[in-house]
Image (cartoon, rainbow, N blue to C red):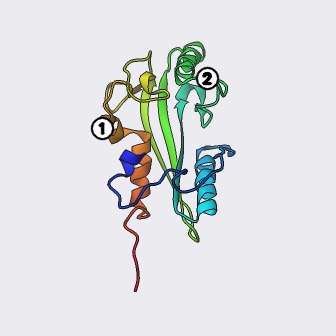
Amino acid sequence: MRDLLSRYPWRLLSVDEAGFRQELQELGTGYADNALGKAAAVTRATGLPALADDSGIEIDALRGWPGSMSARWLGEGASDRERLLGLIEEVKRRSPDDARARYVCVVAFTRPDAEPVIAHGECLGVIVEPRGDNGFGYDRGFLSNDLGVTFGEASEVAKNSVSHRARAVARLAESGVLDPPRSFA
C-alpha cells in the first residue's frame, strides 16, 4: 500500500506510529464494512485521516467464495500456503472446469468531520498451481489475465500496475481525497 500511495503528498503512518493501540477488527459482512470499520476506528481514536482496505479472492463458479473470508476460511492458524493449496483443492473438487477468479479490494478513507470515501478495485484471473516466489496470500496461484503470469511470478512494479489494490487506490484518487490538503487564509 505504501508503494501505491507514494506519489501522493501525504505523510504515511502505520497505526502504531499514529498512536493507535487497539486491535483492528473485521466485524462486517463484506469488504466495504470491514474497510470502513477499520478506518473509522483509527480516525475516531487518533483524530487523523485514515485509510484501510479489505480484500479477498473470489471464485466465479463458487459464487464469489471465499470473498471477504479469504484470510479466515481455513481457520485462524492457517498459513498463506495452506489457504492457497486448500483453495486450489476446493476449486478442483467443486468446479473443476471453471477456475476463473478475481481479486477484490475495497479501500475506505476517513477523516474527522467528513463523510468517508470508499473505492473498489478488482482484477481478473484464473486459479492455477502455485508458481513464483513473489507476493503473498494467493498470489502464487493467481494467474493474472492482464499480465499472463501469476502474481507470484510478477515483479512488484508489474503487479502494482494491475492489482486490485492499485485499481482501488486509483479510484480513490479520482475522488480527489488524495490531492494535497488545502489551507485557507
Relative vertical location of residue 150 with respect to residue 124 in this rendering, above or below: above
Q: Residue at x 33, y 35 (%)?
A: 156
- Could you tell which of marks 2 and 1 lies nearer the N-terminus? 2
> For the residues marked 2 and 1, what is the alpha-carbon distance in whole angstroms?
28 Å
Q: Quadrant of residue 90?
A: top right
**x%, y% of residue 119?**
49, 53
- Secondary element at image label 1: helix
Q: Which mark is residue 157?
A: 1
- Quarter of the figure that contains the C terminus: bottom left
Q: Residue at x 56, y 20 (%)?
A: 87
Type of the residue with mark 1: Val
**x%, y% of residue 19?**
57, 56
Residue density around tag 2, few if under 14, some if 14–19, many if 20 or more, within 10 Å: some
**x%, y% of residue 107?**
51, 50
Relative vertical location of residue 14 with respect to residue 138 in this rendering, above or below: below
Relative vertical location of residue 181 with respect to residue 99 in this rendering, above or below: below
Q: Quadrant of residue 149?
A: top left
**x%, y% of residue 84?**
52, 21
Type of the residue with mark 2: Ala
- Secondary element at image label 2: loop
Q: Residue furthest bottom?
A: 185
In-image side of 142 versus 35 (left or right): left
Q: Which mark is residue 124?
A: none
C-beta proximity under 8 Å, tags 2 and 1:
no
Relative vertical location of residue 66 with respect to residue 177 in this rendering, above or below: above
Q: Which residue is identified by label 2?
A: 78
Residue density around tag 1, few if under 14, some if 14–19, many if 20 or more, within 10 Å: few
